[in-house]
């Protein structure tokens, strides 16, 4: 099955470069482009892509609000943020809104393609150090937030969440806790359900914002 991709960026050169990379890859095709968030929403409704490559800083409707609106659709696409700076607070807000991860615009083409395939398959693209740094800046600016469900985690689910914040895979978590991968998968599912998190990235952000894990 061919993965359908929409590119949203206000720079023509960036959109052209991303289109060339995606269209040159077997099993992927760009089905639409947008120069701001409002246009992206219209294109997604028309083309129904699997993945949206979303710039966060765009005129009119930025990538954060566009991500929120896209993920409120009945059959939302996966959103992968493409940004110039990894320490951009806009990136953090887009991840909070439900984006599956982010890439820098200087990312190598092969890594971009791999990331699109990853999020299309339902995985999140997690960069623990970058998210921890962004969360640390937010935590220093205010007190911890109340995150529903965080106090309902069992001790073992809490252990799993802490290891998730370090970017460990299910296999690595299983080795760390000396349990099966199937058991870890169950715990991860329970963590996401209790936190109301769309994916691992949102769960990690919830862990930091609630003070369950310190980003310091």
Image (cartoon, grey):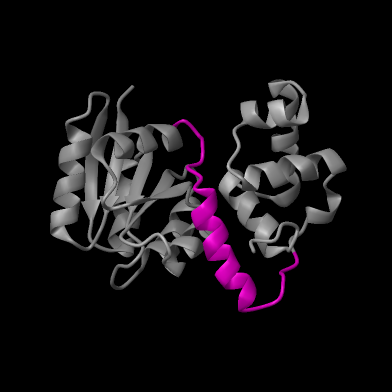
Count of marks placed on residues = 0
Q: Position of residue 200 (x, y in %)?
A: 60, 44
| Residue 45 visible within the image | no
- Segment tinted magenta in the rendering: 121-146
Query: Residue 125, can we see it?
Result: yes
* Among the 4 quarters of the image, the one containing residue 209: bottom right
- Residue at x 85% of width, y 50% of height: 152
Which image quarter is the N terminus in? top left
- Estimate the x, y position of residue 161 in percent, counting from the top left: 71, 45
Could you say which is closer to the camera, residue 4 or residue 165? Answer: 165
Residue drawn 44% across and 57% down? 67
Q: Is residue 151 left or right of residue 115?
A: right
Left or right: 149, with 61 as reference point: right
Is 46 a magenta residue?
Answer: no
> In screen coordinates, is 166 left or right of 157?
left
| Residue 178 to residue 97: above or below | above
From the top left corner, tell me how far across and down residue 137 is, in percent. Answer: 56, 71
- Quarter of the image for residue 190 reads top right
| Image coords of residue 141 (percent x, y) | 61, 79
Using residue 27 as the reference point, say whether residue 72 is left or right of it.
right
The front one of 129 and 41 is: 129
Which quadrant: the C terminus? bottom right
Q: Nearer the viewer, residue 175 or 105?
A: 175
Q: Residue furthest bottom?
A: 141
Question: At 46% from the left edge and 30% from the top edge, which residue is drawn?
Answer: 121
Q: What residue is drawn where x is 18% and y is 34%?
A: 23
Taking the magenta stretch, the answer to whether it contains residue 123 is yes
């Amino acid at each position: 099955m061919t993965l359908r991709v929409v590119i949203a960026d206000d720079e023509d050169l960036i959109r052209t470069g991303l289109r060339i990379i995606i269209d040159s890859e077997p099993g992927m095709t760009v089905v639409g482009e947008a120069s701001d968030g409002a246009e992206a929403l219209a294109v997604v409704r028309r083309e129904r892509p699997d993945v949206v490559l979303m710039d966060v800083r765009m005129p009119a409707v930025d990538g954060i609000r566009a991500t929120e609106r896209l993920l409120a659709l009945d059959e939302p696409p996966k959103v992968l943020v493409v940004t110039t700076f990894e320490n951009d607070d806009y990136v953090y807000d887009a991840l909070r809104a439900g984006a599956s991860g982010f890439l820098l615009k200087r990312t190598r083409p092969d890594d971009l393609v791999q990331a699109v395939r990853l999020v299309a398959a339902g995985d999140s693209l997690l960069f623990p150090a970058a998210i921890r740094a962004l969360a640390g800046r937010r935590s220093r600016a205010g007190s911890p937030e109340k995150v529903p469900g965080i106090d309902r985690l069992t001790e073992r689910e809490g252990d799993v969440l802490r290891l998730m914040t370090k970017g460990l895979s299910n296999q690595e978590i299983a080795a760390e806790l000396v349990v099966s991968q199937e058991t870890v998968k169950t715990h991860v599912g329970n963590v996401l359900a209790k936190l109301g998190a769309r994916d691992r990235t949102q769960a990690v952000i919830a862990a930091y914002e609630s003070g369950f894990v310190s980003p310091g």
